[in-house]
Amino acid sequence: MNKKYIGLVSILIGVILTSLIIGTINIFEGHLNIVYSIRLPRILFAALGGAVLSVSGAAFQILLNNKMADSFTLGMANGAVIGAAIAIYMSASIFLIPLFGVISGIFSLFLVLFIAKQIDSTLQPQTLVITGVLFSTLLSGILYIIIMIDPTKTKSVVQFMFGSFSGSKYEYILLVLVCFIMSLIVLFKSAKDLDLLTLGELRAFSLGVDVTKLRLKVLIAMSIPSLVLLSFTGVIGFIGIIIPQMIQYIHPRKSKELFILSGLYGAIMLAIVDTLARTILLPVQLPTGVLLSIFSIPLILFLMYKRFLQKTN
């Protein structure tokens, strides 16, 4: 294994072990059962979530030739939250809420793909991103209406909108991990075609790449683990945009290496942010998505500014 990968894995393990120790419950005072059943699954799920969202973001940015592309530009995140809100409003079982979120998110994804396809049969990157953003805005309006109809029933939806790993379970980790592994198989098999796509759509087509088929295949494959994750955590934004951009800004990479590094850096970053969200204002716990936004937005603005300077020079 490459030395830099070993180093990043070591850092990730160190972050996880450190996070286990920090909190209101002391791991050294006989509370191992609580730590094992509550804190450990949360830490592992946050790390896995960071990997899933970062790798998905890297794939979407290559597919759409848009550095601001990730799961949220395709309407999936808001789609999942809408599904959860409907389930809560209907007083559905706690186990059905994630299911509603997954179904709604998948429906939103395919609806965005369908609308974009009707507008542009070649499914150009700009068309897909604009369609996804507009559809997400529409879903945000619908979600606000659902919340206002009965605020007492949908109070938890407001928390779900901010994103949190509180209440994580090993079953959630297993389900997301299985989906992620299956998606990675598709992604790595498509890595060479994705490298060709970075040369330009026409160049990739001339070299034998079915660009439309490649986009649909990888888009759907990488959307599924993100969607399953978001149905459990709520909206976790920006990490899928910022991690791949930072890696490429420091040193441009080919697709396969970009995906591996995005997964490792994403896991480390979200594990750290979730630990801070859980401990920085003890005994109050902040939503992970809120703290992640506070950290991420200045970095995104910095990267945008650097790109602007590169273009002007």
Image: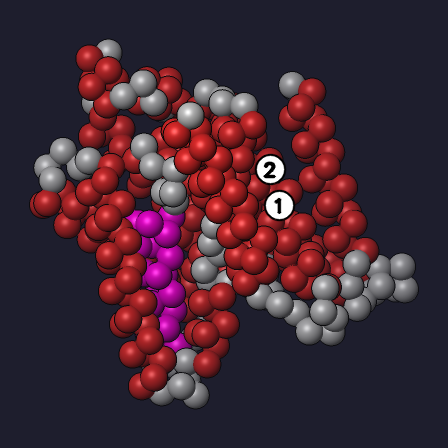
Q: Residue at x 29, y 79 (%)?
A: 145
Q: Residue 188 in magenta? A: no
Q: Residue at x 68, y 33 (%)?
A: 9
Q: Where's residue 78, x and y in %? A: 35, 61
Q: Quadrant of residue 283?
A: bottom right
Give the residue number, with chain letter if any, for mark 1. Answer: 269
Q: Nearer the viewer, residue 80 or 138?
A: 138
Q: Main secondary structure of the magenta part?
A: helix
- Is disc 2 in contact with disc 1, using a CB cutoff of under 8 Å? yes
Q: Is residue 63 left or right of residue 231?
A: left
Element type at mark 1: helix
Give the residue number, with chain letter if any, for mark 2. Answer: 265
Q: Residue 84 in magenta? A: yes
Q: Residue at x 84, y 59 (%)?
A: 27
Q: Where's residue 247, x and y in %? A: 54, 31
Q: Nearer the viewer, residue 31 or 84?
A: 84
Residue type at the position of mark 1:
Met
Q: Where's residue 131, x and y in %? A: 21, 50
Q: Is residue 275 above or below residue 154?
A: above
Q: Is residue 154 left or right of residue 267?
A: left
Residue type at the position of mark 2:
Tyr
Q: Is residue 108 above or below residue 262?
A: below
Residue stretch in magenta = 71-88
How many residues crowd around disc 1 within 10 Å: few (fewer than 14), some, or many (20 or more)? Answer: many
